[in-house]
Image (cartoon, grey):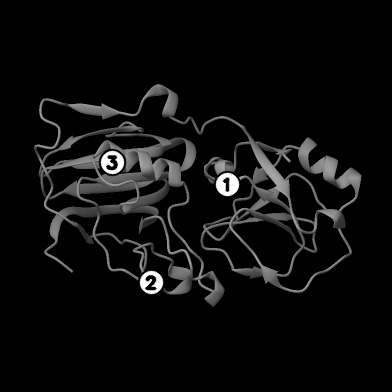
Amino acid sequence: MSELYPVCRVISSGVGLSIQDSGRPGWRRFGLPASGAMDAYSMVWANRLVGNSDWSPVLEFAFQGVKLEFLADSWIACCGARTEGDLDPWSGRFVEQGEILSFRRCVGGVFTYLAISGGWASDLWFGSCSANPRARIGGLIKVEDILYSQRKPNVGLFPGVSKRVVLKESKRDYCNDVMIRIFRGPQYEFFNREQVGEFVSKEWRVSSRSDRTGYRLEGGTLYTDKTISSEPTLPGSVQVTPSGQPIVTLNDGPTVGGYPKIAFVHPGDLSWLVQTSPNQNMRFQWVD
């Protein structure tokens, strides 16, 4: 690895602070999930605000509580959840050496992405720096860790500019209830017409017992007495457990599963789903 530049000290790590990028596709056949940023849309925009390539590594954390001290002048940006702190969401600005940045309160959404000019540095595992502690790949960032950038921060990146923002039409507000598009899953026919109708007529909430492996949905049950052998499972698969609880498989989730899959989440809506907090409602809509 080329020379790295220390740019940040972690004062408080909040919830699940880690480095993520676009993930490691192509390894699922070996039982290794792709991982990567839960909300790829927000990651891309954070990188664009500081002049990085779309898939440069970013910091990802859930909800609130992160506090960082910057050790060098840098351009940074954050996108994703609406947090109250020292950096407005969907914006980027210049930070000076010694400045402390806090994300004190999350008022909408779940995941926040922090990009730095030059990209955060991390070791690579199977072609990606995305951490997946459950798979013993990388780990969460801890208090007092020193974070590095891949290149020396370009302090003159945007001369005469005090702040950069994402255009209004491209910003996302993750505070509101959402409608998620879904396709029929391979075991769609296991469920009767009434259950299929209930799935899209009910309001669902994300259980607090959810994480990067999958979101458990609360709000109803979908029973079937039919079973399947284990088969490949992709992020966005909506599996139904024997208890009737739907679970949406996500980035760090298993690559195979033995529960019937009633639906797949539309790829364009998966980033909306993962930003739905336990106090928000979501509904589903079948698409052909």
Q: Nearer the viewer, residue 176 or 92?
A: 92
Rendered-image quadrant of the C terminus: top right
Residue 124 visible? The answer is yes
Nearer-N-terminus badge (3/2): 3
Q: How many marks?
A: 3
The residue that appears at 36% across and 45% down in the rendered structure is 113
| Circle 2 residue | 126
Type of amino acid at the residue the image marks with label 2: Phe
| Circle 1 residue | 267
Type of amino acid at the residue the image marks with label 1: Pro
The residue that appears at 52% across and 42% down in the rendered structure is 275
Name which quarter of the figure residue 124 lies in. Answer: bottom left
Nearer-N-terminus badge (3/1): 3
**Viewer-nearest of discs 3 and 1:** 1
Rendered-image quadrant of the N terminus: bottom left
The residue that appears at 59% across and 51% down in the rendered structure is 208
| Circle 3 residue | 102
Mark 3 Cα shell of 10 Å, populated few (<14), some (14-19), many (≥20): some
In the displayed orientation, state which residue is furthest to the bottom. 30
Nearer-N-terminus badge (2/1): 2
Residue 103 visible? The answer is no
The residue that appears at 10% across and 40% down in the rendered structure is 155
